[in-house]
């Protein structure tokens, strides 16, 4: 029966979201370090680069899953690291509507 289960959200993603939404960077660092320590990585001591560290963790944790794309879109990142799209714009973050949806207005 377990093979039919599909996770909606994993625990590390909840910690990353909590780190992003924390009231202060120091509080965010506590959430981010929860995941890092569980992965055997050293805890970060400075919250000065918190957003960059969260982006790195998203990139590692969700490789090939698409969650990183939504993180970049949500944070309105100007570029995709190691991407070929060049400078990102709102048009590049928005997929076109399917032709059938345009044709039938649904």
Image (spheres, rainbow, N blue to C red):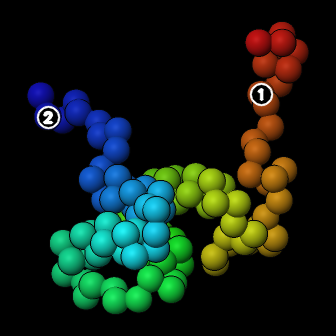
**Left or right placement of residue 59 versus residue 29 in this view:** right
Classify 40 as above or below 93.
below
Q: Which residue is mark 1?
A: 98
**Is any part of residue 36 visible from this angle?**
yes
Classify 94 as above or below 106.
below
Tell which of 100 and 80 is nearer to you: 80
Circle 2/circle 1 CB separation < 8 Å: no
Q: Name the image quarter holding residue 39.
A: bottom left
Residue 15 pos. (x, y %): 33, 59
Tell which of 29 and 2 is nearer to you: 29
Secondary element at image label 1: loop
Which quarter of the rendering shows the C terminus? top right
**Dot 2 alpha-carbon crowd within 10 angstroms: few under 14, some 14 to 19, many 20 or more:** few
Residue 23 pos. (x, y %): 46, 62
Q: Which residue is mark 2?
A: 2
Classify 35 as above or below 44.
above
Residue 49 pos. (x, y %): 51, 84
Q: Residue sitting at 39 percent across and 57 percent down? A: 18
**Dot 1 alpha-carbon crowd within 10 angstroms: few under 14, some 14 to 19, many 20 or more:** few
Q: Name the image quarter holding residue 12.
A: bottom left
- Residue at the far right in the pictured view: 103
Which quarter of the rendering shows the N terminus? top left
**Is any part of residue 64 visible from this angle?**
no
Secondary element at image label 2: helix
Q: Whole-Å distance between the Cαs marked 2 and 1?
A: 35 Å
Q: Earlier in the sequence, mark 2 or mark 1?
A: 2
Tell which of 25 and 56 is nearer to you: 25
Q: Residue sitting at 34 percent across and 89 percent down? A: 45
**Left or right placement of residue 4 versus residue 63 in this view:** left
- Residue at the far front in the pictured view: 23
């Amino acid at each position: 029966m377990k093979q039919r289960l599909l996770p909606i959200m994993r625990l590390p993603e909840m910690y990353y979201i909590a780190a992003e939404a924390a009231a202060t960077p120091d509080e965010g660092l506590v959430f981010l370090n929860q995941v890092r320590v569980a992965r055997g990585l050293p805890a970060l001591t400075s919250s000065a680069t918190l957003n960059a560290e969260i982006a790195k963790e998203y990139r590692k944790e969700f490789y090939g899953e698409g969650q990183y794309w939504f993180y970049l879109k949500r944070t309105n990142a100007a570029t995709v690291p190691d991407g070929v799209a060049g400078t990102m714009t709102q048009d590049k973050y928005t997929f076109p509507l399917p032709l059938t949806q345009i044709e039938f207005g649904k």
